[in-house]
């Protein structure tokens, strides 16, 4: 049965690799055919029968996932309703979040004949402005809202975070924002569902923590441990958890669920023993099982039902049922049953990093335990406890290493020590105290939990400050990660298996992996998808240059931290030789501060004013002045604009950089307008010639004049607007002019990251959204 479930899981995962969904209606035919073959072959050919059953399980998992995916895709907002003002009535679900820009919440519209096609769940923002005061929203409330919606869409920079997959997994079928309207109003409430009442209780618990701990820096951690709301944990604390490998403790993990079940089950069994009449009907050990499972289920429910928590609950449920029925189910069977339950409930769980890390950790512990049972125990009790703990840490770390490098391109070297302290503190002290405060509103419980958390954070700060606390490297290919997972599993097999430690040799190419860089005289130009802004990574044989650092999304969020730094690290870039900031607009310089804080930079070039905060860093600065030039690895860099005597608008003073390799040139233009273009053409039109052009000012109608387009004569032109740009970028007339010139056009909002390789074969272009397309991705 375990093998059959693994084949079912493989079929489910296979569906998530598809760019287009096949029709699920034809899949029952091969399933029935293989099942029939299995029945026919059973008496004479049992191996063939088992193979047929496995194939049937694979096809069943695949077909079920396709069927569920088709249903969810059918719930998406039609394109005809995008950018239209719609009045909806519905209910707020989950926990509303207040951020630096306003409010973010999930909304479930009520079915209405006047709004056909509106999805059953949408994500809305309600942004603050100077003319109105935002209301206070609560979970379960009914509202009438005037909204403007669009299909789910996110920045696409593989192997970075796939926001569209994240939204699709959570059933969010449209995004949008609330429009200012006098009709936006709270409606009379009606009968709440059970889940809505749970959300209201979760919100009341969050409010209680906020009232008792208004100034505590650890309030967000305690809220996350109780109700699963991680929004209040600041980015600085997340960075500490990432460096020390303790991020898993800040979510509702399997460890916390098991602990709650154990505590409640133990108390329930103790109370049961005190009533002889009850003991005569059912042993205390069996009576404790339902109490523990129900408590675990309640905790999973109020915590948001994440994959690790659901997986653990399924395992506890299967184990409890087996014990109540008098059967002794093996841990591997329980894990397989939990895997089946998770994938039947949520076929998209395989898209979550938590799915792979949680099941990988349990699998590692099972392998380690199998080897331990075959060895006679020796030494005292304390020795065995320490030995088992060290073996468990070794097994989990060995399996987690390739997963973490594949998913996040980093692995904490201090994680075993950090977890050795953090796991018992968080599980045995912080979480029980926080849960008690949720049930019993005694402020002393929350204050004590915050005090213990503070001391733990001091210890984690000490570890995070150690040199080489975090191993970071380029993203390894999927096949190398898979090979290392198999090698790690082989190394964890029981003693007696010959050469099992040889599996660790597979980690040498994993830890030493570096991407192939351009050859001497060649270059790779990556135009990142950062929304309404610009960020271009130019890579030569040994050096890296970044032209602009993307936009600032809000006071605490920018493209530098969210997109550019993770992208550079995934490409193995640990240092930038040059950072060019074309001008001070926030959509070009907004991420520069985060970038400078995260990576060493050899030189900053810009047209920024002398009082700009970016110039106060210790990075050497050189103003962009026409005529400045340098060479690296056979590639020539030339600043064409602005001239020393040029005076104009901030946009027109943008740095213009021409980068020339053996196979061709790229012209990076910032936000220059028609005036700067005319001057460049008048000074020397011939030096503007380039095979690749990053369109000035995202394709604004105040740029890209006909003379400039003719002088550049680009074969490839990239526009970098935001999705459904409110500025109307790129302007239709500008697009028409480039099309008339014969250029091939690209748009980062439609194509995601666009990569151009300049080598001996010429210029090869790759649109990442097309190259890595999945069925849930926006096709627009």
Image: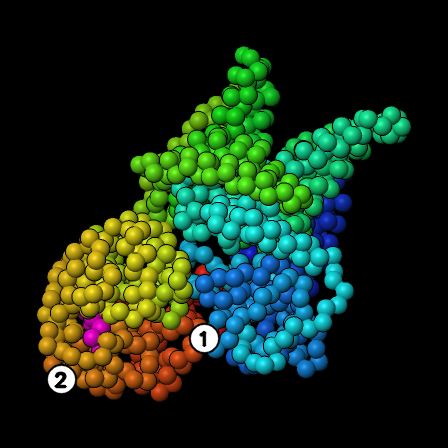
Where disc 2 sits, the SS reads helix
Q: How is the image coloured?
A: rainbow
- Give the residues in magenta: 652-661
Give the residue at mark 2: 682
Tell me where residue 329 appears, x and y as whole percent. 71, 32
Kindly report the secondary structure that dominates the magenta region of the rendered protein.
strand
Q: Residue at x 42, y 55 (%)?
A: 159
Q: Is residue 598 magenta?
A: no
Residue 422 against residue 713 in the figure, above or below: above
Instruction: Give the mark, 2 or 1, whose residue is nearer the N terminus.
Output: 1
Q: Which mark is residue 213?
A: none
Q: Residue at x 66, y 74 (%)?
A: 89
Q: Nearer the viewer, residue 234 or 163?
A: 234
Left or right of residue 394, residue 71 in this image: right
Q: Residue at x 42, y 76 (%)?
A: 725
Give the residue at mark 1: 130
Q: Are marks 2 and 1 in contact (CB under 8 Å)?
A: no
Q: Nearer the viewer, residue 154 or 58?
A: 154
For the question of whether residue 571 can be seen, the reply is no
Which quadrant is the N terminus positioned in?
top right
Tell me where residue 613 appears, x and y as whole percent. 25, 61
- Local crowd size for mark 1, using a 10 Å CA cut-off: few (<14), some (14–19), many (≥20): few
Residue 159 against residue 244 in the figure, above or below: below
């Amino acid at each position: 049965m375990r093998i059959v479930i693994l084949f079912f899981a493989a079929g489910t995962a296979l569906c998530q690799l598809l760019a287009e969904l096949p029709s699920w209606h034809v899949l029952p035919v091969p399933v029935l055919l293989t099942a029939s073959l299995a029945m026919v072959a059973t008496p004479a050919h049992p191996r063939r029968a088992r193979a047929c059953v496995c194939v049937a399980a694979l096809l069943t998992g695949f077909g079920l996932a396709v069927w569920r995916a088709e249903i969810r895709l059918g719930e998406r907002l039609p394109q005809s309703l995008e950018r239209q003002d719609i009045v909806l009535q519905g209910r707020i679900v989950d926990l509303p979040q207040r951020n630096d820009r306003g409010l973010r919440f999930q909304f479930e519209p009520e079915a209405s004949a006047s709004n056909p096609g509106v999805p059953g769940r949408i994500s809305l923002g309600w942004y603050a402005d100077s003319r109105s005061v935002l209301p206070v929203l609560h979970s379960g409330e009914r509202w009438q809202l005037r909204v403007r919606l669009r299909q789910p869409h996110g920045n696409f920079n593989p192997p970075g975070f796939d926001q569209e997959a994240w939204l699709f997994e959570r059933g969010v079928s449209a995004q949008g924002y609330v429009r200012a309207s006098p009709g936006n109003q709270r409606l009379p409430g009606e009968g709440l569902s059970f889940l809505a009442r749970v959300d209201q209780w979760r919100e009341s618990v969050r409010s209680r923590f906020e009232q008792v701990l208004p100034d505590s820096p650890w309030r967000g951690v305690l809220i996350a441990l109780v109700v699963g709301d991680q929004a209040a944990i600041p980015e600085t604390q997340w960075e500490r958890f990432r460096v020390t490998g303790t991020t898993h403790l800040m979510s509702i993990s399997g460890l916390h669920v098991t602990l709650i079940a154990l505590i409640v089950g133990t108390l329930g069994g103790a109370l049961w023993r005190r009533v002889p009449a009850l003991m005569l009907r059912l042993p205390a050990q069996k009576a404790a099982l339902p109490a523990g499972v129900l408590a675990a289920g309640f905790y999973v429910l109020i915590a948001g039902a994440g994959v690790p928590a659901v997986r653990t609950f399924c395992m506890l449920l299967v184990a409890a049922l087996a014990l109540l029925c008098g059967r002794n189910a093996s841990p591997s069977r329980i894990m397989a049953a939990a895997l089946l339950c998770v994938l039947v409930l949520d076929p998209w769980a395989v898209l979550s990093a938590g799915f792979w890390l949680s099941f990988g950790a349990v699998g590692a512990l099972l392998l380690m335990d199998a080897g331990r049972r075959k060895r006679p125990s020796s030494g005292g009790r304390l020795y065995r406890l320490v030995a088992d703990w060290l073996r468990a840490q070794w097994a989990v770390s060995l399996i987690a290493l390739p997963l973490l490098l594949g998913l996040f391109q980093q692995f904490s070297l201090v994680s075993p020590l950090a977890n050795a302290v953090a796991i018992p503190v968080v599980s045995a002290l912080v979480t029980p105290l926080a849960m008690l405060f949720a049930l019993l509103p005694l402020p002393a419980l929350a204050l004590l939990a915050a005090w213990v958390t503070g001391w733990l954070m001091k210890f984690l700060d000490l570890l995070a400050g150690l040199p080489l606390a975090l191993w970071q490297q380029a993203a390894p290919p999927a096949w190398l990660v898979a090979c290392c997972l198999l090698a790690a599993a082989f190394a964890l097999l029981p003693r007696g298996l010959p050469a099992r430690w040889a599996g660790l040799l597979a980690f040498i190419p994993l830890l030493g992996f570096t991407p192939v860089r351009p050859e001497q005289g060649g270059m790779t130009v990556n135009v990142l998808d950062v929304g309404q802004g610009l960020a271009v990574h130019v890579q030569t044989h040994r050096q890296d240059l970044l032209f602009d650092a993307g936009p600032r999304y809000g006071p605490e969020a920018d493209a530098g931290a969210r997109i550019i730094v993770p992208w550079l690290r995934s490409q193995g870039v640990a240092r930038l030789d040059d950072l060019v900031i074309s001008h001070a607009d926030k959509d070009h310089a907004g991420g520069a501060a985060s970038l400078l804080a995260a990576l060493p930079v050899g030189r900053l070039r810009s047209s920024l004013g002398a009082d700009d905060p970016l110039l106060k860093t210790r990075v050497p600065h050189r103003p962009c002045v026409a005529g400045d030039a340098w060479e690296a690895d056979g590639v020539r860099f030339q600043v064409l604009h602005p001239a020393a005597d040029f005076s104009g608008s901030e946009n027109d003073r943008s740095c213009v950089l021409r980068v020339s390799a053996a196979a061709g040139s790229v012209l990076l233009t910032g936000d220059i307008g028609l005036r700067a273009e005319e001057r460049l053409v008048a000074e020397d039109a011939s030096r503007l010639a380039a095979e690749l052009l990053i369109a000035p000012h995202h394709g604004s109608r105040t740029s890209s004049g006909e003379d400039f387009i003719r002088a550049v004569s680009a074969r490839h032109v990239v526009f970098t607007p935001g999705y459904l740009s409110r500025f109307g970028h790129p302007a239709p007339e500008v697009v028409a002019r480039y099309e008339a010139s014969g250029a091939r056009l690209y748009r980062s909002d439609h194509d995601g990251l666009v990569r151009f390789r300049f080598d001996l074969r010429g210029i090869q272009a790759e649109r990442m959204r097309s190259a890595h397309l999945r069925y849930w991705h926006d096709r627009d």
